[in-house]
Amino acid sequence: MMKAGLVSVTFRQLSVGEILRVMERAALECVMWGGDVHVPHGDTARARDTGRRTRDAGFTLAGYGSYYRLDVSEREGLAFQTVLDTAVALGAPVIRVWAGRRACEAGRPDHYRRAVDDALRIAALARQAGLAIAFEHHSGTFTDTVESTSRFLADTAHPAVFSLWQPPNGRPGAYCLQSLAAVLPRLHHAHVFHWWPDAGTRLPLADGEARWPAFLRVLKEHGRDIDLLLEFTRGDSPVQLLADAATLKRWISGLR
């Protein structure tokens, strides 16, 4: 069964306890805690406490939303081992990482090669600890288009390497379905929101009725019962989250 959850950075202004209470009101099931505000990289005591509080509240850990960037973070002072130790303390099954810091069209071949090598290196470390990594599917990285994502996933083939997915901003539904198909065999979970026509216009999830049910049907048809994590509500509003959660759960129920 697909589970509805939350990406914690949706509400950077709220504490861990406040987010857990909002999730309870929204009847969500799982959460990805962010590595910037709620579970900072390297704060294993806070990670351990947050993981305990999450489980005690009846939620599961969908993942750890780190800000580790391939071929960038190690050189800038953020060691992957620090990120991994934090994720282990949290009890997260997967670590979100970013595929470099350049769009595929702007990336230099040397940066690309080092990013691939770094991905394979940290995947091996994650697997030794019983975790996996998953690339953010995002602009400004090597996973920013259908073609670049397919290539990067092929070049980083490893049992502990997965991908996340979210609909590319401003793209028609057909393109979004192509991007979903590109990651489907390696998809770990999806981020759910409706921004249209660009990232500056956040709308209620219900306004995505013409798009999102089609995405979810693809997941269902391929037997992908994954976590669906709500992200970035209109106006950063917890009240809006309640409505968006109800919409997402209605769509999930309609798939049965």
Image: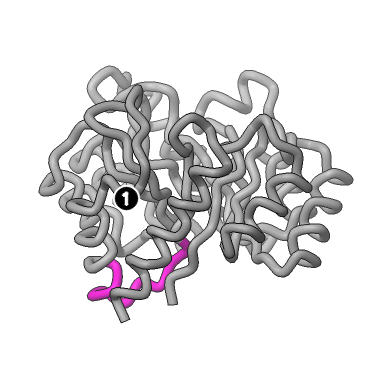
- Label 1 sits on a secondary structure element that is helix
Placement of the C terminus among the 4 image quadrants: bottom left
Q: How crowded is mark 1: few (under 14 residues within 10 Å), some or many (20 or more)?
A: some
Q: Residue furthest bottom?
A: 256
Give the x, y percent position of residue 234.
Answer: 44, 34
Placement of the N terminus among the 4 image quadrants: bottom left
Question: Would residue 10 be found to the left or right of residue 202 on screen?
Answer: right
Q: Which residue is drawn at 28% across and 18% down?
A: 106
Decide which of 133, 194 is in the foreground and name it: 194
Residue linked to disc 1: 206
Q: Residue at x 69, y 47 (%)?
A: 19
Give the x, y percent position of residue 57.
Answer: 76, 64
67 over 105 or under it: above or below: below
In the image, is residue 223 part of the stretch drawn in magenta?
yes
In the image, is residue 105 part of the stretch drawn in magenta?
no
Res. 125 in view: no
Give the x, y percent position of residue 211.
Answer: 20, 51
151 over 1 or under it: above or below: above
Which quadrant of the structure image shows residue 9? top right
256 over 192 or under it: above or below: below
Q: Which residue is drawn at 82% across and 60% down?
A: 52
Q: Residue furthest right?
A: 45
What residue range appears in magenta?
A: 219-227
Res. 23 in view: yes
Question: Would residue 112 be found to the left or right of residue 56 on screen?
Answer: left
Give the x, y percent position of residue 3.
Answer: 49, 68
Which quadrant of the structure image shows residue 53? bottom right
Amino acid under label 1?
Ala
